[in-house]
Amino acid sequence: MDAAGLRCRTSLPRTDLMNSIVSPTGRRTALRLMGQATAFVAVAGATRPIAAGAQQLPAPTLTMGELSELAVRLTAVPRRRGFQTVPFMLTSPDSWDQEAAGDVLTYRYRSRQMWEVTELSTPWLNLIREAMNGQVFAHGNPEFLPVAAVHGTAHLALFDQPTWDRYKLAGLTDGKPAANSFILEKPGVSAEDDLQDLEGFYGPANNNILSLQRRGAVFIACHDSIHAVARRLHGIPDFAATPADVIAADLTNGLIPGVILVPSVVAFMVELQRAGFTYAKAA
């Protein structure tokens, strides 16, 4: 496979924005406020144009509040994709999602948590979901923001399915999983599901990145991990003819919508902790 054979996507389709309402306010009030949020998104999109090569966050259908306002800003701010090649170390702000990362760092709600996620096989999505449920519905913090700082083998969950297929990423997991099941919502779930329904939107049968994004969770992608995956792929005969820097660029272009790319997750965790995020290890 040569460099010319690699695809560089500049955008991905937006998902249905009307599937979830997470605030404990009444449905009638929530629907009214969602209309306001839609108008806010339109205004934000008009005032902060998306740069070429950007991806847009599948914006959570939240009622108006601090977390909803953050989701609006993250929807409008550029994601830098469409790369042809990327170096081993990022040093220029033009090569990562600096603006979106800055929006996360300036979020000042009283309840914020950073999850360091390193192992694909650990129940990290379950832990983040449990944290959101407890903070929102038990502790009364509806604007709670969890941030998943993802690196190591867990980073494979942040690549879309075409990227999994093109680079045979299941081979890096010994076929467990065989596809990126981490980005698939359980069919038929809705944010209007009973909170006690184990099979519903808030239950353990629906652990996935997309549902958490709809509820306002943020996922941070790590360039260092992406380049490490690229170097590993370059060492496989099927991809040996393609430079690691080119593979890394294509992997970056294949990040799922909404994730925020930073040069190094372990470095960005320092910034998150300085900004007041509570550290938690997903293990």
Image (tube, grey):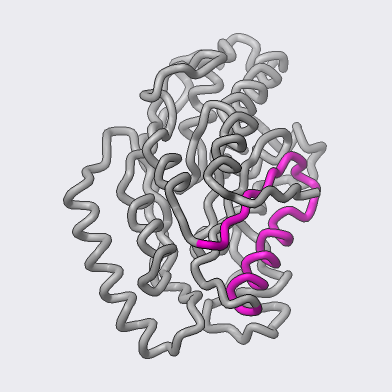
Where residue 102 appears, as percent x and y from the top left, is 41, 40
Name the one closer to the observer, 211 or 39: 39
Drawn side of residue 58 relative to residue 211, left or right: left
Residue 275 appearing in the image: yes
Q: Is residue 185 above or below residue 179?
A: below
Drawn side of residue 20 relative to residue 172, left or right: left
Identify the magenta region: 110-138
**Picture quarter with the N terminus:** top right
What residue do we see at 36% from left, 87% from top?
29
User: Is residue 25 covered in magenta?
Assistant: no
Q: Is residue 143 above or below residue 47?
A: below
User: Across the whole image, how many numbered discs are drawn on residues?
Assistant: 0
Q: Is residue 29 above or below residue 219?
A: below
Q: Is residue 241 above or below residue 133?
A: above
Name the one closer to the observer, 248 or 129: 129
Where residue 274 appears, as percent x and y from the top left, is 56, 40
Name the one closer to the observer, 131 or 118: 131
What residue do we see at 68% from left, 48% from top?
279
Residue 257 appearing in the image: no
Where residue 11 appears, as percent x and y from the top left, is 36, 41
What residue do we see at 36% from left, 35% from top?
10
What residue do we see at 60% from left, 33% from top?
265
Where residue 205 appears, as percent x and y from the top left, is 72, 70
Q: Quadrant of residue 161?
A: top right
Name the one closer to the observer, 49 or 93: 93
Drawn side of residue 243 relative to residue 94, left or right: right
